[in-house]
Amino acid sequence: MSSKYEVSQKEVSTLLEFIKSGEIAIPEIQRPFVWEKSKVRDLMDSLYQGYPVGYIIVWRNPNVKLKDGKMAEGKKVLIDGQQRITALTAAILGQQVVDDEYKRDRIVIAFNPLEGKFEVSNPAIKKDSKWISDIAPLLSGSLKASHVRREYCKSNDEVDEEFIEDVIDKLKDISKRQIGLIELAPDLDIETVTEIFIRINSQGVVLSQADFVMSKIAANEEYDGSTLRKAIDYFCHLAIAPEFYDFIKDNDTDFASTQYFHKMSWLRNINDDIYDPSYTDMLRVAFTFKFHRGKLADLVSLLSGRNFETRVYEAEIAKESFEKLKEGIFSFMSQTNFERFVMIIKSAGFVSSKQLRSQNVINFAYILYLTLIEKGHVAAKIESYVKRWLVMSILTGRYSGSPESTFDRDIKRIREIDFEEYIKGIEEGELSDAFWDVSLVQSLGYAASTNPQFNVFLASQAVVGDKGLFSEFVTVKDMLEHRGDVHHIFPRNYLKKAGLSRGKYNQVANYVYTQSEINIRIGDKAPKNYFAELFKQFDGGELKYGGIKDMDALKDNLKQNCIPEAIFDMELEDYDGFLVKRRQFIAQKIKEYYWKL
């Protein structure tokens, strides 16, 4: 194939034969079928009417050089059109699909010859003689058209037999309808394939590099790629839904007997959501850890057997790459590794998934953890290193720009030099006094409770057990773990009534964790007013705002929450000055927290 791709028209029956024979490998056939059943019905109708139904895109795996010098021809891997192909196998071949709950089910499409109408079969249709309740036996060839016509006419003796014969022949001809097939050249890189895909796909869907990796894995029969792909998918689903364990055990007995299932079975007892990885996360961690590279596009090439020096595809490289990836996947899903890593994250004060907004940050922290174990660092050092790296990455936005390039640079340097030397160099360059006193203060000047620096501040409070504003016993950590909410020190409605914009009253420096009942009592009062009411508690008055009963306890509580004591007398005109001061206090607290990690 000299061009980037070739376009041809194939009959539906030919495409289905390609699937059955394995000439086209459907990479994600075990993953959930996301189309509504009505879309399968509509696809059948479009084919019946002779309307275009889009293109199927396949990418031929490169021919691979074997040890004896012979070349093995690569399969075609389906990269776009899975839902249409799966719909065809369901409606025409009668095969089951996996639904969004990972349960196997048949999608049965019915046809009314008198109206030329398709519908998803249901009990009423099955009882109605005007309908052919399941078109699959006819289209797959297990029932002859003549038999279907005779049976239909026998149940509907008033119909015109010739008319029914013509309609059923037209229905049978769905298998002869043509669908466009675009075959991409094996030597294209991912960037080119992605560009072609985007230009052809009218919906503008973007395939991720992880999608290509999953396709390459699943299409490889020699190294049991289908099971490996399933292990990745199942682990990620099980991490979110532990009850999925019984489904796998009962419905996928072949997989349940594998080492992969044994390695992930511990997840059935876990309900922690600090780190719920997607298959992209899992692949990225396993790949970067074992291959010491950061670009997933390289993994696609390596799994195909590419020799980066000679640019030839070799079976031995493909074999080694699959073995390495399997090792990385096993390391990722190890209960000991995973749970200890999550424990380290929590010990840094990140006790809620809401505090960790960047998957790239947590992914590389896990890569670092696995790498340091492999390099033989002691546990106490690993814990400190991972926490420092995690927090440094969040504060500096290390993986927010070009994460793959940064992953690639970091993993190579971490493998090459002493880690203590590497992280100290980064800290000296990026966490200077100017960072703590200027850059960090400025980064706290935004209107978003998801601000990453603010989430580090909450982690610093969780670590030392700081109490929520005016709380005597309830800690910030308690509220983070039990889905508490941030509230406004200068109440939102108080500022809104004064004409301040959303971006102004929702400043990060105006946020604090407070028990809801305390926040309700504060209402929309100015700080000066609700503090005046709070002081009455010191003289035996009603405990209106938490359980604090004296000035020393109040001052300590304000210090824990980085709120200046001048808040006692503050009104609207003091708001801007309050924000400036509190940002400085928060930055200082984060600095002290970081250097103790």
Image (tube, helix red, strand yellow):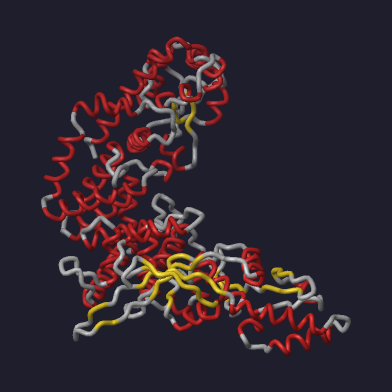
Residue at point 41%, 38% (across, down): 477
Res. 249 visible in picture: yes
89 vs 566, nearest the viewer: 89
x and y, in percent, of residue 272 in the image: 43, 53
Q: Residue furthest right?
A: 158
Residue at point 41%, 31% (across, down): 467
Q: Quadrant of the N terminus?
A: bottom left
Q: Is residue 424 left or right of residue 386?
A: left
x and y, in percent, of residue 188 in the image: 31, 64
Q: Is residue 149 left or right of residue 562?
A: right
Quadrant of the rendered structure where residue 213 is? bottom left
Please determine whether, in this image, residue 44 is positioned above or below residue 500: below
192 vs 376, nearest the viewer: 192
x and y, in percent, of residue 570 in the image: 44, 11
Q: Quadrant of the C terminus?
A: top left
Residue at point 26%, 40% (across, down): 392
Res. 230 visible in picture: no
x and y, in percent, of residue 218 in the image: 39, 72
Residue at point 54%, 21% (across, down): 522
Q: Is residue 175 left or right of residue 151?
A: left
Q: Is residue 388 left or right of residue 419?
A: right
Please determine whether, in this image, residue 290 is positioned above or below residue 353: below
